[in-house]
């Protein structure tokens, strides 16, 4: 880097505090090799998503067994899109599929939570593995269950609100606005849970809230870009072959990079180093 560029950078950092903070966060992100950490988190998250998909498959099987309307809808959908998959097969395999999915989700999900926690704590410069092994595993399991409940309840509430607006005959603009607000609220809740809960680092509101906002905006932009990509490749067989697993892995990698940069932003917000949880 030339001397002139260095001087210009120093002037910019002195003039705008947010530029100085951005620089310090980027340096911290680079120092801890956060790109590698994001790849490790994506690895565990990738397998956790498949375990969660098995649970969803099992739940669908139970719905098919006890709801004739759902059976007809699923039968029509599979006949048009996946003719090789029969609803009777989904219904018959719901039991053992659910068991495999539940066990797999516990193993891979706890590993995913552990990797998110240890990676964020490395960014904050505190010990990555707090407390004893058994208690730490139980806490991570509880955090995994809490995240699943948080996302599930939030999506249920948002869907109920959209259904209410449709029932009241609201205009399409209202539905679009409600969809955006619901997605933004879910992203804020998810960012707050991952940064403030999973990391198990005591952060003041001055540190936490800007980082939550930064991560929520990043997730929103990432989701929007993902929707555009899906819409583009949906009708192209050459792309649709690889957009499933590869697209999910890429999404998780970028998602975790956004999360870890948010952690770096909180870690370099000034003041004393955050306190680490003892357990």
Image (cartoon, grey):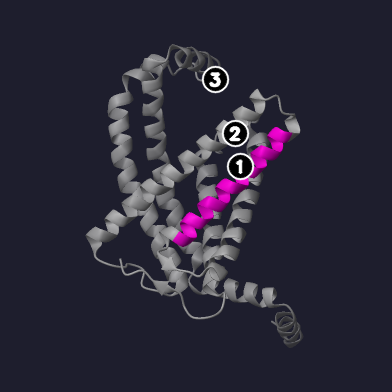
- Nearest to N terminus: mark 1 or mark 3: 3
- Nearest to N terminus: mark 1 or mark 2: 2
Residue 62 at x, y percent in the picture: 36, 22
Question: Dot 2: few (<14), some (14–19), or many (≥20) neighbours within 10 Å?
Answer: some
Q: Nearer the viewer, mark 1 or mark 3?
A: 1
Looking at the rendering, in which quadrant would you find the C terminus?
Answer: bottom left
Residue 18 at x, y percent in the picture: 68, 73
> Pointer 1: what residue?
182
Asked if residue 77 is among those painted magenta in the image, a careful observer would answer no
> Pointer 2: what residue?
161
Residue 60 at x, y percent in the picture: 41, 24
> Which region of the structure is painted magenta?
174-196
Q: Is residue 109 above or below residue 273?
A: above
> Pointer 3: what residue?
81
Main SS of the magenta segment? helix
Residue 228: name its quadrant. top right
Question: Dot 1: few (<14), some (14–19), or many (≥20) neighbours within 10 Å?
Answer: some
Left or right, residue 254 beside residue 16:
left
Mark 2 lies on a secondary structure that is helix
Q: Is residue 208 above or below residue 105?
A: below
Question: Residue at horizontal 37%, vertical 52%?
Answer: 143
Mark 3 lies on a secondary structure that is helix
Question: Residue at horizontal 36%, vertical 58%?
Answer: 114
Q: CA distance from mark 2 to mark 3?
A: 29 Å
Q: Nearer the viewer, mark 1 or mark 2?
A: 2
Q: CA distance from mark 1 to mark 3?
A: 29 Å
Q: Nearer the viewer, residue 187 or 110?
A: 187
Left or right, residue 235 beside residue 116:
right
Q: Nearer the viewer, residue 50 or 268?
A: 268
Question: Residue at horizontal 40%, vertical 38%?
Answer: 52
């Amino acid at each position: 880097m030339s001397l002139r560029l260095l001087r210009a950078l120093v002037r910019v950092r002195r003039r705008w505090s947010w530029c100085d903070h951005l620089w310090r966060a980027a340096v911290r992100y680079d120092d801890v090799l956060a790109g590698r950490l994001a790849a490790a988190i994506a690895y565990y998250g990738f397998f956790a998503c498949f375990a969660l998909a098995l649970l969803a498959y099992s739940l669908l099987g139970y719905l098919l067994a006890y709801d004739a309307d759902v059976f007809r809808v699923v039968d029509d959908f599979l006949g048009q899109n996946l003719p090789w998959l029969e609803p009777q097969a989904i219904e018959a395999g719901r039991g053992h599929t659910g068991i495999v999915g539940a066990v797999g989700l516990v193993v891979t999900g706890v590993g995913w939570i552990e990797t998110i926690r240890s990676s964020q704590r490395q960014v904050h410069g505190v010990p990555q593995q707090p407390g004893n092994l058994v208690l730490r595993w139980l806490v991570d399991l509880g955090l995994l269950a809490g995240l699943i409940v948080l996302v599930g309840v939030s999506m249920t509430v948002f869907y109920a609100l959209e259904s209410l607006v449709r029932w009241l005959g609201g205009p399409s603009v209202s539905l679009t606005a409600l969809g955006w607000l619901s997605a933004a609220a879910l992203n804020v809740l998810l960012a707050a849970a991952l940064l403030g809960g999973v990391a198990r680092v005591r952060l003041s509101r001055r540190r936490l809230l800007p980082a939550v906002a930064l991560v929520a905006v990043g997730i929103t932009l990432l989701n929007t870009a993902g929707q555009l990509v899906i819409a583009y490749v949906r009708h192209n067989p050459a792309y649709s072959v690889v957009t499933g697993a590869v697209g999910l892995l890429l999404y998780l990698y970028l998602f975790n990079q956004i999360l870890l940069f948010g952690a770096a932003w909180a870690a370099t917000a000034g003041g004393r180093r955050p306190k680490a949880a003892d357990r």
